[in-house]
Amino acid sequence: MPAPADTQPADARPAVAPRATAPTRPTGLGRLYVVVAWIEAFTWAGLLVGMFLKYVTETTEAGVWLFGRLHGGAFVAYGIVALIVAVRYRWGIWRTLVALAAAVPPLTTLLAEWWLRRTGHLVAPPQIPGAPDRRP
């Protein structure tokens, strides 16, 4: 029985070209965004532990006192950094709103950071020839 017409020997098949992917290593302001996103998530976790100790076990208020202040600062810093990166890296309105909204639910900045890194939006956009150099 003859071989089907569409089968070819393995070495006769064309090589598959490697898929072009966006660089996934954050650059410049993208690295700052990653750091601030992780700090915001860490302080959120600390605040949650502090609230557990204060309201469930009723042992201490120190966690809420400390992490409440730290998280407030991290929350504001995350919002400012997200807006700066959004403008400089040309995210667009919806991507910017998602990144800003990620600061509200606990630990969601880590998901936003993962998504933005995976889609290549934490990498400085390419320069347009002839445009002034405005890289971060």
Image (tube, rainbow, N blue to C red):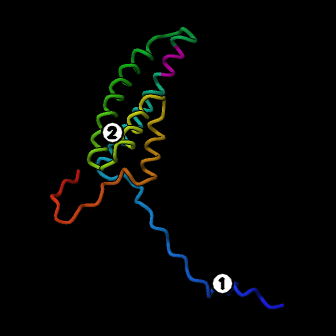
Which residue was labeled with disc 1? 10
The answer to whether the residues at label 2 and label 1 have Cβ atoms under 8 Å apart is no
Residue 51 counted in the magenta span: yes
For the residue pair 1 and 25, the one nearer the viewer reads as 1
Residue 70 counted in the magenta span: no
Q: Residue 4, percent across and down?
A: 75, 86
In the picture, measured across the screen, residue 118 lies left or right of residue 74, that is right
Residue drawn at x 32%, y 26% is: 73
Q: Residue 16, percent across and down?
A: 54, 76
Name the amino acid, label 1: Ala
Q: Is residue 19 above or below residue 36?
A: below
**For the residue carrying disc 1, how many other residues have a C-alpha within 10 Å: few (<14), some (14-19), or many (20+)?**
few
The part of the chain drawn in magenta is 48-53
Q: Residue 106, percent across and down?
A: 48, 29
Q: Looking at the image, is mark 2 or mark 1 earlier in the sequence?
A: 1
Most extreme residue toward the top is: 58
Q: Which mark is residue 82?
A: 2
Quadrant position of the N terminus in the picture: bottom right
Residue drawn at x 42%, y 28% is: 43
For the residue pair 133 and 68, the one nearer the viewer reads as 133
Overall secondary structure of the magenta stretch?
A: helix
Residue drawn at x 46%, y 24% is: 46
Quarter where residue 68 is shown = top left
Q: Is residue 67 above or below residue 79?
A: above
In the picture, measured across the screen, residue 74 lies left or right of residue 110, that is left
Quarter where residue 56 is shown = top right
